Amino acid sequence: MAATKTDSRSQTARARARQAMADELERARKRESKLVAVFSAIDARADAEAALGEALIELKDLGVAQSDLAEMTGLSAREVGTAIRAAKDRTAPDDQTPETTDEHASDTTSDHNGAESH
């Protein structure tokens, strides 16, 4: 009789453990899904920021001062500058890829040489 009671408890413990694992897997799936949504929103925000910056750059090219852009749009001067930089950064890598690569390579070399001298 005691063996049956122990077996029953073991089965119940295993069932609780299986349910706990299933619950944890479900939470992990939900977290993953929400993280995907967050990353998509971050990408969309970056795209919107770049589009804003491009429009602001075009207004600057038409002769509107950056300080006037802030006043006209209701954005802070910092937000205007950030959007303009985002647009420039979005287009800059295509134009400056070789320079960036060369600078990074020389930085890596100098860092490596510095590490060897220690």
Image (tube, grey):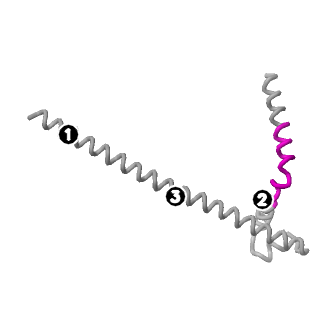
Instruction: Give yes or no for residue 12 being in the magenta stretch.
Output: no
Instruction: Give yes or no for residue 89 being in the magenta stretch.
Output: yes
User: Given the image, on which type of amino acid does mark 1 rest?
Assistant: Arg
Tell me the CA gap for discs 3 and 2. Answer: 26 Å
* Crowd band around label 1 with a 10 angstrom C-alpha radius: few (<14), some (14–19), many (20+): few
Residue under numbered circle 3: 34
Nearer to the camera, 13 or 118: 13
Q: Earlier in the sequence, mark 3 or mark 2?
A: 3
Residue under numbered circle 2: 90
Q: Which of the 4 image quadrants contains residue 116?
A: top right
Residue under numbered circle 1: 9
In the rendered view of the protein, which quadrant contains the N terminus? top left
Q: Secondary structure at mark 2?
A: helix
63 horizontally vs 12: left or right: right
Q: Position of residue 106 (x, y in %)?
A: 85, 36
Nearer to the camera, 79 or 49: 49
Q: Residue at x 43, y 53 (%)?
A: 27
- The magenta segment is 88-106
**Which residue is outermost to the right?**
63
Q: Position of residue 117 (x, y in %)?
A: 82, 22
Please say if 52 is above or below 114. Answer: below
